[in-house]
Image (spheres, grey):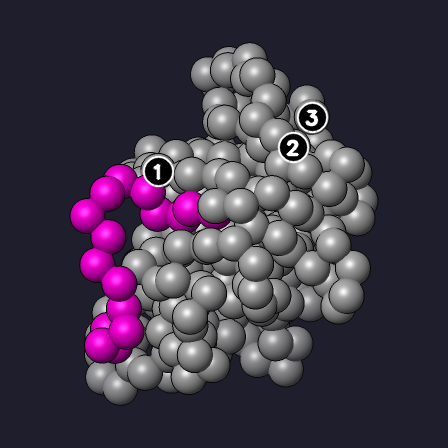
């Protein structure tokens, strides 16, 4: 389901995210400055850097949690310098967000978790909702786990549900904040293959991580947050 507002910007170019001379702050402190970045549709982009270097703040700027007062930011059709608070839900419906700590509702089953998101984003038709839930569960190979409560799942399975949740509204952009940070190496490999498959279908993925071995193994463009700046890194791409 797509929701449009009169303020939504038509972008004829190929960039799905764009920063120009942007300053990102946390309260009064500058986290990143002079940020210049373009992400094209279908790209897989890694954000790397030490803890506290600004990776999460950059992602939050893209999904409208961190306000932009200096410079210019465009994302999925919106000028984030001018976006109104009432537009933020429309912005986020065009994105899928994956968190390190899964953020599933512990008192609801997998199916009910996904159904809750659909209701919250404006879906009404129960048959269409059921169909979409089954589609995304199938996409992450969890179609038979819909009845389970989150505590009954492994960490990797919970993150698969997190990915399914991010895919529900067929977003143009996937933002993943350390999605494998709490997972073992084997589970990390499985989830990275899944994210790469999603990217290969044409989705744009921006992923914050500190796992450098994974970056070497799975293809992608790399941007580094360092010394309050965002820098392009040379990539060694290895197909798996």
Which percent across, then down, holds residue 172? 33, 53
User: Does the residue at mark 3 contact the one at mark 2 (Cβ under 8 Å)?
Assistant: no
**Quick one: quadrant of the N terminus?**
bottom left
Q: Is residue 66 visible?
A: yes
Q: Quadrant of residue 108?
A: bottom right
User: Which residue does the numbered mark 1 point to in the structure image?
Assistant: 40
| Residue displayed at 42% across by 39% down | 38
Q: Which residues are magenta?
A: 3-19
User: Which residue does the numbered mark 3 point to in the structure image?
Assistant: 212
User: Which residue does the numbered mark 2 point to in the structure image?
Assistant: 224
Measure the alpha-carbon separation of dots 1 and 2.
17 Å
- Whether residue 228 sits left or right of residue 116 in the image: it is right
Q: Say which label, 1 or 3, has the lower sequence index.
A: 1
> Foreground residue, 36 or 111?
36
| Residue displayed at 75% across by 68% down | 27
| Residue displayed at 22% across by 77% down | 6
- Tell how many labels: 3
Which percent across, then down, holds residue 67? 57, 68
> Foreground residue, 70 or 14?
70
Q: Is residue 205 above or below residue 118?
A: above
Measure the alpha-carbon separation of dots 1 and 3.
23 Å
Q: Nearer the viewer, mark 1 or mark 3?
A: 1
Main SS class of the magenta portion in the image: loop
Q: Secondary structure at mark 3?
A: helix
Q: Secondary structure at mark 1?
A: strand
Which percent across, then down, holds residue 214? 63, 27
| Residue displayed at 26% across by 40% down | 14
């Amino acid at each position: 389901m797509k929701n449009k507002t009169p303020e939504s910007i038509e972008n004829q170019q190929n960039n799905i995210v764009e920063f120009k001379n942007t300053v990102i702050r946390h309260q009064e402190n500058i986290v990143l400055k002079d940020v210049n970045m373009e992400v094209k549709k279908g790209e897989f982009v890694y954000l790397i850097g030490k803890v506290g270097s600004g990776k999460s703040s950059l992602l939050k700027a893209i999904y409208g949690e961190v306000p932009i007062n200096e410079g210019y930011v465009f994302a999925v059709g919106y000028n984030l310098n001018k976006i109104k608070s009432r537009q933020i839900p429309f912005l986020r419906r065009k994105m899928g967000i994956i968190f390190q700590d899964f953020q599933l509702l512990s008192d609801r089953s997998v199916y009910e978790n996904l159904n809750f998101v659909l209701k919250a984003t404006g879906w009404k038709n129960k048959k269409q909702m059921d169909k979409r839930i089954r589609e995304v569960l199938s996409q992450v190979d969890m179609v038979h786990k819909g009845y389970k409560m989150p505590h009954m799942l492994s960490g990797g399975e919970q993150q698969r549900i997190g990915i399914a949740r991010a895919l529900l509204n067929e977003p143009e952009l996937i933002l993943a904040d350390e999605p494998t940070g709490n997972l073992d190496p084997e589970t990390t490999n499985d989830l990275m293959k899944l994210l790469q498959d999603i990217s290969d279908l044409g989705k744009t993925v921006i992923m914050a991580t500190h796992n450098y071995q994974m970056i070497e193994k799975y293809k992608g463009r790399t941007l580094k947050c360092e010394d309050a700046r965002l820098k392009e890194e040379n990539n060694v791409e290895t197909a798996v």
